[in-house]
């Protein structure tokens, strides 16, 4: 259960602050984050894996707000980055460079050079060609590049096909059959130091044995590397730990750790992991205001001021997000996300209306909830879309020239705007009208 977002006197709170108060100050749509949720989730992983000296590298891509990264850095977290920009963000937020890992199938020489200059912990290398490029860039800098090989273990993570990364047909990681050739290449190249092995098999994984199977698949290769005297220190088991979008769903972290710890221990390696969603997902909501109620055809469309540019997940993954009024008298005190009483209410509403909750964008895929029974809502009232802390703002765009929403962080009874709402001027910065000379030439 997630107590950080809960109802009191029929009103939604984030930690100790009424959500309506935040929306009145910051406007809508607005992302609201519970800082303590992020810290609590981070700590739960540290505790579950304490016997294998875990280094948790929070996955920046899931929520890269600087204030969030700052809180994570202060909690001792490392960072998993996938671009120069994410490394920059982490460093700006106070990350220790030697707690940053850098993954991605298309790292450019410029990005590699930047990461080497900053002194990151290691590159998670995804191809033979990348080994050569990292080696060249490191040679230019007259330095040794720390790397891990990201292996594709060909394991089915049993998740949405767009977020599966560990099956053979996916573009990620090095095929096991090519891994030994890579090890040989590392020896030849001299200025690469193989410090670890990396696997990341997908996202929103809810079965506790998927990662363990991946470890089993790579164990023979790890043993071979050790026999060949590679100085391996880390096993990076990736991220992908699922959360509850529906009550009761999600990866049980302690059962998961019970399956993983003996395997990691037997290999004599330190554990590194890269959770994003597990830390951020249920730490954020998107608050939006009802603009119009539009009965049409056989439906009731509830048109709200947030849209698919603010939260893309329903449109592209048909993702379910619990959506509920910020104020609703019928709700039991303490009802919280993940608490069945909230969903039971959703099913049992007597005075409700079945809505399609949609945004103002010119696409039929612009929706948050389809055919959902909610208490009947009026124009101007607020709706909360839950479980939006991961891949919400991080995937927001300016489609339809809409400014991205503001982001607010709550810590106990304090809150602050951690990122201003984007203005139209912010959006057109860098754009140019046709240069005058060209217009004159045409005339
Ligand atoms: N490590 C690597 C190498 C990754 O590619 C990812 C996510 C993570 C860690 C963190 O995964 P997490 O713990 O958050 O599952 N936009 C999609 C999710 C894409 C995940 C991409 N990679 C969504 O909204 O569901």
Image (cartoon, helix red, strand yellow):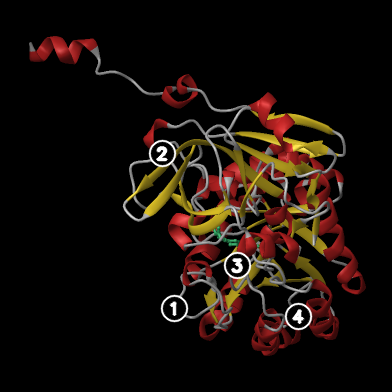
Q: Position of residue 419 (x, y in %)?
A: 65, 31
Does mark 4 have its CB less than 8 Å from ligand 1? no
Alpha-carbon span between mark 2 and mark 4: 60 Å
Foreground disc of the pair 1, 4 = 1
Q: Which residue is mark 1?
A: 169
Q: Which residue is mark 2?
A: 360
The quarter in which the N terminus is drawn is: bottom right
Crowdedness near tag 4: few (<14), some (14–19) or many (≥20) residues, C-alpha within 10 Å: few
Up/down of 265 relative to 64, above or below: below
Instruction: Mark yes or no: residue 114 visible.
Output: no
Ligand 1 shows up in the quarter that is: bottom right
Does mark 1 have its CB less than 8 Å from ligand 1? no
Ranked by sequence position, the earlier of labels 1 and 3 is 1
Ranked by sequence position, the earlier of labels 1 and 2 is 1
The residue lying at 41 percent from left, 39 percent from top is: 360
Crowdedness near tag 3: few (<14), some (14–19) or many (≥20) residues, C-alpha within 10 Å: many
The residue lying at 52 percent from left, 34 percent from top is: 379
- Say if mark 1 contacts mark 2, CB within 8 Å: no
Alpha-carbon span between mark 1 and mark 2: 37 Å
| Helix, strand or loop status at disc 4 | loop
| Helix, strand or loop status at disc 1 | loop
| Helix, strand or loop status at disc 3 | loop
Q: Which residue is mark 3?
A: 203
Q: Which residue is mark 4?
A: 229
Does mark 3 have its CB less than 8 Å from ligand 1? yes
- Say if mark 1 contacts mark 3, CB within 8 Å: no
Q: Position of residue 61 (x, y in %)?
A: 61, 51
């Amino acid at each position: 259960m997630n107590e950080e977002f809960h109802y009191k006197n029929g009103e939604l709170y984030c930690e100790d602050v009424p959500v309506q108060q935040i929306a009145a100050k910051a406007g809508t749509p607005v992302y609201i984050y519970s800082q303590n949720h992020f810290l609590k989730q981070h700590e739960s992983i540290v505790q579950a894996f304490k016997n294998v000296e875990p280094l948790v590298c929070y996955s920046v891509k899931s929520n890269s707000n600087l204030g969030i990264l700052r809180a994570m850095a202060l909690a001792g977290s490392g960072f998993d980055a996938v671009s120069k920009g994410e490394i920059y963000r982490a460093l700006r937020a106070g990350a220790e460079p030697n707690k940053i890992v850098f993954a991605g199938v298309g790292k450019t020489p410029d990005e590699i050079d930047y990461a080497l200059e900053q002194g990151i912990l290691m590159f998670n290398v995804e191809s033979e060609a990348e080994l050569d490029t990292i080696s060249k860039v490191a040679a230019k800098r007259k330095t040794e590049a720390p790397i891990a090989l990201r292996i594709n273990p060909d394991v089915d993570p049993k998740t949405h096909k767009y977020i599966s990364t560990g099956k053979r047909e996916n573009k990620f990681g090095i095929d096991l059959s090519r891994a030994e050739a890579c090890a040989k290449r590392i020896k030849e190249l001299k200025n690469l130091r193989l410090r670890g092995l990396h696997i990341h098999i997908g996202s929103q994984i809810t079965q506790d044995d998927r990662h363990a199977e991946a470890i089993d698949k790579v164990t023979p290769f790890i043993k071979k590397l050790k026999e060949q005297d590679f100085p391996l220190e880390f096993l990076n088991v990736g991220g992908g730990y699922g959360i509850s979008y529906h009550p009761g769903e999600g990866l049980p972290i302690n059962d998961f750790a019970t399956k993983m710890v003996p395997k990691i221990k037997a290999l004599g390696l330190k554990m590194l992991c890269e959770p994003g969603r597990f830390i951020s997902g249920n730490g954020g909501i998107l608050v939006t205001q009802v603009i119009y109620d539009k009965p049409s055809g056989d439906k009731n469309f509830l048109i709200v001021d947030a849209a698919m540019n603010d939260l893309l997940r329903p449109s592209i993954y048909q993702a379910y997000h619990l959506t509920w009024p910020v104020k609703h008298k019928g709700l039991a005190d303490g009802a919280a996300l993940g608490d069945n009483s909230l969903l039971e209410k959703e099913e049992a509403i007597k005075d409700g209306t079945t809505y399609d909750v949609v945004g103002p964008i010119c696409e039929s895929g612009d929706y948050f909830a389809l055919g959902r029974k909610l208490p009947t809502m009026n124009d101007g009232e607020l709706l909360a879309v839950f479980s939006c802390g991961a891949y919400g703002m991080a995937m927001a765009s300016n489609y339809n020239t809409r400014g991205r929403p503001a982001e607010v962080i709550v810590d106990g009874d304090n809150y602050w705007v951690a990122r201003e709402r984007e203005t139209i001027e912010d959006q057109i910065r860098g754009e140019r009208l046709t240069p005058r000379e060209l217009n004159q030439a045409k005339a």
